[in-house]
Image (spheres, grey):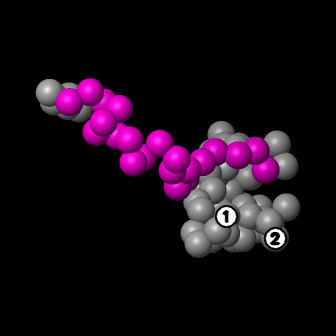
Amino acid sequence: MIFLSLFPPEVIWQEQKGLEPEIRMVKMQGIDVLVKNKRGQLVLERVLSTNPADYLRTEFQPGCDFKQCL
């Protein structure tokens, strides 16, 4: 995507500087997972693994509270 403007990028994107990303990647028991911040609570969103057995583990169920899954 190309964004053309007469204004410098600092002026256009100034309100977004302090925002945290809504989804971020973290390691959980040695496996990369995506967690989403919902109202201050981290919720497991997606497992990023090449091992099919990791998707069958109960602690990696989507929607699980991240702190309870540890």
Question: Foreground residue, 40 or 13?
Answer: 13
Q: Which residues are magenta?
A: 7-28
Q: Residue at x 60, y 48 (%)?
A: 24
Question: Foreground residue, 40 or 35?
Answer: 40
Quadrant of image for the N terminus: top left
Q: Quickly name the residue at label 1.
A: 42
Q: Secondary structure at mark 1?
A: strand
**How many residues crowd around disc 2 within 10 Å: few (fewer than 14), some, or many (20 or more)?**
few
Q: Residue at x 42, y 46 (%)?
A: 16
Q: Could you tell me how many numbered marks the image carries?
A: 2
Residue 20 point in image, percent of width and height: 55, 50
Residue 13 point in image, percent of width and height: 34, 40
Q: Quickly name the residue at label 2.
A: 68
Whether 25 is among the magenta residues is yes
The mark lying in front, picked from 2 and 1, is 1
Quadrant of image for the C terminus: bottom right
Dot 1 amino acid type: Leu
Q: Earlier in the sequence, mark 2 or mark 1?
A: 1
| Residue 41 image-quadrant placement | bottom right
Residue 14 point in image, percent of width and height: 38, 41
Residue 12 point in image, percent of width and height: 28, 39
Dot 2 amino acid type: Gln
